[in-house]
């Protein structure tokens, strides 16, 4: 009897282990192949050049700049709105059927395929608002995409704060806003930040919605610089500039015939994976650092 | 409803040992969670610069009663008060529609069952009430913080580590930090909700001693689970059962010659 149960236990253990090996193995294999193909192309010339007909002279500069600027817009729009919405839902909103509905909708939005967001953006930003196929459009689209993720993770981080802490603040005569600004936000900052970074690292790899709003695949110039030599020294012309982003550049290279372009694609992929991993690593570090300080 | 400002009624035994002067008083205070009646027309006087203890078995509504005083229930939906809580000397009913709960909380202070310091420095914990009130002057805050920490008998232990996290102190120290935080704003009435139930006997003794010291300046209303504690530290005791006030009187009298059979049963340990 016991033997049979032990046998079952060992069997399940083996099953679990092989499932894990399969998952990790695939990942390692994928990353390894990317590394072997791409590492040779990943040099300074590649990082600082524009795309070219000749694979060996092509580079990823516009895509890196494009990705960075799009992420900047996404962060500036998506984070404040997402965090504010989460605070409202958690701290201010009364429980009614309306807030219940909003909650369900937000959670479901996180599961909507990203290309749907692209379609929405094409209709709304590109045509209705006339923003064109610009960095601004792409940034806003991705901001919409990460909004549900930011809201959900922020709410979870806020909910982790014990009610006793809030009551302590209220008992001292604090208003709701003072409680939020002085206690709720600072204590949940690590959780919120982790959610934000993870959301951004997902957004940076998004391709479908960006293609839908009309990103270029071959671009030989950079957006106008945000700094100018005339007052007021700041320019927002770059917002309306055409652009490309890294996953699209990668896709453009993959779809070309020839070994050399495949190497370029692998190198671009390597860079993208590296950036995503770096962002995830940052998220883990931030959480670790801030968790140490806040406890109750 | 008419507020018995100059109280003509006597205690439940009819002996007339009613405290004076009063700092506050509840008049037929009822409280509902949704449709559930949790407090049933409770009238208790709170004597100025005395310690008034609320005793009773768990679930009798004593914490609910205490939390009415700083309108803590307003934070949650579906709660309702009836009756009045009058604060003296201005005879203001703090349950009045026109009274902002924040205004009430500015006058009173509360210490909770479980020590709940903010995960900020010791200094910031004590200073928070002042910051909420818009005080920015560094010297004023410094002075108030030291004063409050001295009043809470914590100054000597933390004066060299005011920038340490409040949560890094021991349990008893944390609770005294919470008392200091409550005292920093010079409250008229200090509410304590079983402040020693999470502490060991030594920390409990130090807090009881502290309360004896504090009552010279502050009126104290304390909920306690522990009858011995009520007998040791309070001047007046109210015994509650199932949301009703069973008996109120001077602590000494209530514990030696209770007027009601129920009170006697409870304090002799026959139930509860």
Image (cartoon, rainbow, N blue to C red):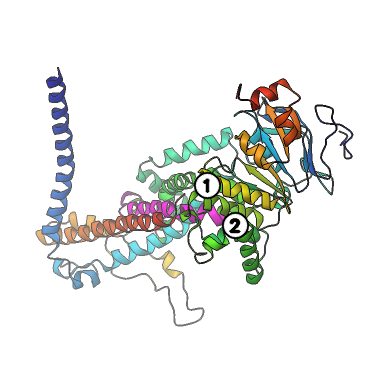
Nearer mark to the viewer, of 2 and 1: 1
Dot placed on the residue nearer the N-terminal end, 2 or 1:
2
Up the image or down, B149 lies above or below B261; here it is below
Image location (x, y in percent) of residue B251: 72, 36
* Extreme-bottom residue of the structure: A229
Image location (x, y in percent) of residue B175: 55, 50
Residue B172: mark in rendering: none
Mark 1 residue element: helix
Up the image or down, A272 lies above or below B208; here it is below
B105 or B11: nearer the viewer = B11
Bounds of the magenta segment:
A181-209
Q: Quadrant of residue A20?
A: top left
Asked if residue A296 lies left or right of residue B93, the reply is left
Residue under numbered circle 1:
B202
Disc 2/disc 1 C-alpha distance (Å): 14 Å
A270 or A54: nearer the viewer = A270
Up the image or down, A232 lies above or below B30; here it is below
Tell me the crowding category of disc 1: few under 14, some 14 to 19, or many 20 or more residues within 10 angstroms, Cα based.
Answer: few
* Location of the N terminus of chain B (image quadrant): top right
A72 or A56: nearer the viewer = A72
């Amino acid at each position: 009897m016991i033997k049979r149960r032990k046998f079952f236990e060992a069997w399940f253990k083996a099953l679990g282990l092989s499932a894990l090996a399969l998952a990790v193995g695939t990942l390692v294999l994928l990353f390894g192949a990317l590394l072997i193909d791409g590492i040779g192309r990943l040099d300074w010339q590649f990082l600082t050049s524009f795309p070219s007909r000749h694979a060996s002279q092509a580079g990823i500069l516009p895509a890196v700049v494009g990705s960075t600027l799009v992420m900047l817009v996404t962060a500036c729009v998506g984070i404040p709105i997402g965090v504010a919405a989460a605070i409202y839902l958690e701290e201010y909103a009364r429980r009614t059927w309306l807030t219940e509905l909003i909650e369900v909708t937000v959670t479901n939005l996180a599961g909507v395929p990203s290309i749907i967001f692209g379609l929405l953006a094409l209709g709304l930003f590109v045509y209705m608002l006339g923003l064109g196929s610009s960095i601004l459009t792409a940034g806003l689209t991705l901001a919409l995409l990460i909004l549900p993720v930011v809201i959900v993770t922020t709410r979870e981080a806020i909910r982790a704060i014990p009610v006793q802490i809030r009551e302590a603040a209220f008992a001292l005569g604090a208003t709701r806003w003072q409680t939020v600004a002085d206690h709720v936000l600072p204590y949940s900052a690590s959780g919120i930040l982790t959610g934000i970074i993870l959301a951004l690292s997902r957004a940076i790899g998004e391709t479908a919605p960006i293609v839908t709003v009309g990103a270029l695949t071959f671009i030989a110039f950079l957006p106008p610089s945000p700094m100018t030599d005339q007052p007021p020294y700041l320019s927002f012309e770059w917002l309306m500039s055409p652009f490309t982003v890294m996953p699209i550049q990668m896709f453009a290279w993959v779809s070309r015939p020839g070994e050399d372009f495949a190497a370029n694609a692998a190198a671009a992929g390597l860079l993208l994976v590296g950036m995503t991993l770096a962002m995830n690593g940052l998220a883990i570090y931030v959480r670790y650092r801030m968790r140490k300080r806040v406890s109750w | 409803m008419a507020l018995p400002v100059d109280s003509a009624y006597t205690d439940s035994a009819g002996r007339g040992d009613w405290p004076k002067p009063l700092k506050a008083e509840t008049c037929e205070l009822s409280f509902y969670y949704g449709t559930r009646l949790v407090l049933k027309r409770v009238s208790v006087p709170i004597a100025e610069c005395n310690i008034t203890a609320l005793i009773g078995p768990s679930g009798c509504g004593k914490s609910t009663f205490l939390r009415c005083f700083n309108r803590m229930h307003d934070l949650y939906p579906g709660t309702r008060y009836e009756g009045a809580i009058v604060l003296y000397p201005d005879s203001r009913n703090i349950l009045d529609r026109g009274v902002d709960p924040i205004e009430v909380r500015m006058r009173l202070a509360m210490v909770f069952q479980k020590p709940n310091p903010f995960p900020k420095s010791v200094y910031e914990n004590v200073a928070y009430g002042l910051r909420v009130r818009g005080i920015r002057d560094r010297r004023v805050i410094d002075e108030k913080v030291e004063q409050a920490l001295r009043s809470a008998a914590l100054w000597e232990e933390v004066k060299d580590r005011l920038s340490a996290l409040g949560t890094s102190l021991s349990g008893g120290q944390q609770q005294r930090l919470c008392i200091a935080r409550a005292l920093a704003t010079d409250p008229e009435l200090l509410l304590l909700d079983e402040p020693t139930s999470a502490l060991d006997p030594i920390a409990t003794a130090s807090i009881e001693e502290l309360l004896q010291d504090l009552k010279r300046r502050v009126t104290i209303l304390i909920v306690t689970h522990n009858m011995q504690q009520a007998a040791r530290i309070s001047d007046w005791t109210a015994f509650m059962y199932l949301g009703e006030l069973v008996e109120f009187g001077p602590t000494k009298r209530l514990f030696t010659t209770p007027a009601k059979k129920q009170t006697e049963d409870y304090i002799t340990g026959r139930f509860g």
